[in-house]
Amino acid sequence: MPSTQIWARDPEVDAEVAVVGLGSMGSMALWQCASRGARVLGLERFAIGHDRGAGHGDSKIFRTAYAEGSEYVPLLQAALGLWHLLEQETGKPLLTMTGGLMIGDPAGSFLGGVVASARMHGLLHEVLTPDQAMQRFPQLRLTAREHAIWEPRAGVLRPELAIAAAIDRARQLGAETLEQVEVQRLTDCGSHVKIESSRGTFRVARAVVTVGAWTPRLVQLPGMDRCWVERQVQAWFRLEEPDLYRPDRFGIFARYIDGVNWYGFPTLDGATIKVAFHHGGSRTDPDQVDRTVHATDLDPLRERVCRGLRGVSEEVVRATTCLYINTPDDHFVIGPATASGRVVVAGPMAGHGFKFAAIVGSVLADLALEGKTVHPIEPFDPARPSFAGET
């Protein structure tokens, strides 16, 4: 890891840090760099708050008992404090703690992973049989194989509001942003980073790359060629019994059974709930995504909703597409992207990253400004064998 001495202020650069991509992770990195007094420039290919990637859809899940691995829990615990800090600094209601249900086969890896992470980190949780879960949550229709874990430390994040809040706060702290700027190439020149774009060339001391599905086009690392972009659909179903799905009566949920993982939310508008599949979408080019939602997208979701929930109509009020960019081992990529460490990357985030965005922004600020971080990101090292393809 480079010495912090190379991060001295350089009056010959356009910015101390350039954040390329101002979506989920980039907005938070911009806020965190600006909050530490850095001269920071944000570059966004589209308009800020766009719906081309993954940071949209009204709601995202926050949870801490994590089936994807116990190594994620310390980051989630740190993220929770930062989400609240951003709320305090901006006055925006970004996170509603509703509690959450993880539902699946108790002998399966999904519930097993939830319980293992909860026990390892001493997280509050409650194991419910199908009958117990349906008695407590009459919204559910469960089979005899579907047990549940109730976690009180879970809730709903509002992605569009959070991204806008972080960028607004960063601007208040002195950050500059440019929209409709397509970055075409980043070059680590040793003493600085050259950024070639549709709006000219920038010379910066360090660069943070947070461009989601477009990451492999800007970052040349072993393993990036094994990542792929997945088209996902989010659908809002009309409620027949809206009162059942108020956030004070029903929380977020994730259900994994027979190889199918789907998830949903309490109502945020008093009329609909959002549900979606986690994975199972088609591979796509991020610049050629089919943005039309088809019956073939909605029918499998409708079947799950009608079979698994009470008080929900089969009518879809609206639906949108979003993108996952997946990794070979389903884990994040966070760390240096060049030998000098002047370019750092967060992404791909493997389709489950938004809940971490606040802490990832802090980690990126650490890496860009100090060359190191105290947070445990070793499992997400771009050079790890399971990502880089080493044997």
Image (cartoon, grey):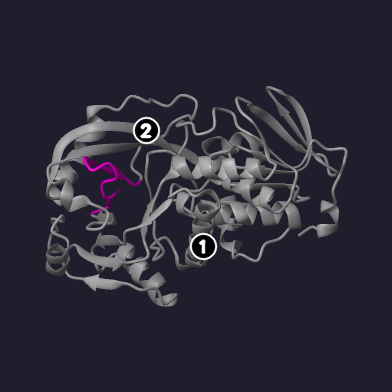
Circle 2 sits in a helix, a strand or a loop, which is it?
strand
Q: Which mark is residue 321?
A: 2
Whether 369 is drawn above or below 148: the answer is above
- Residue 202: image quadrant is top right
Whether 154 is drawn above or below 16: the answer is below
Provide the residue span drawn in magenta.
258-278
Is 56 situated left or right of 40 in this image?
A: left
Q: CA distance from mark 2 to mark 1?
A: 30 Å
Circle 1 sits in a helix, a strand or a loop, which is it?
helix
Is 230 situated left or right of 194 in this image?
A: left
- Residue 19: image quadrant is top right
Residue type for callout 1: Gly
The answer to whether residue 122 is visible is yes
Residue type for callout 2: Thr
- Residue at (39%, 76%) from the top-left corner? 119
- Residue at (33%, 68%) from the top-left corner? 112
Task: Tell which residue pokes out farthest to the front in this image.
Answer: 91
Q: Nearer the viewer, residue 343 or 216?
A: 343
Q: Which residue is mark 1?
A: 81
**Count the marks: how many?**
2
The answer to whether residue 383 is visible is no
Q: Is residue 267 magenta?
A: yes
**The C terminus, quarter of image:** bottom right
Residue 61 percent across, percent down from the top left: 38, 52
Residue 89 percent across, percent down from the top left: 56, 52
Residue 66 percent across, percent down from the top left: 40, 63
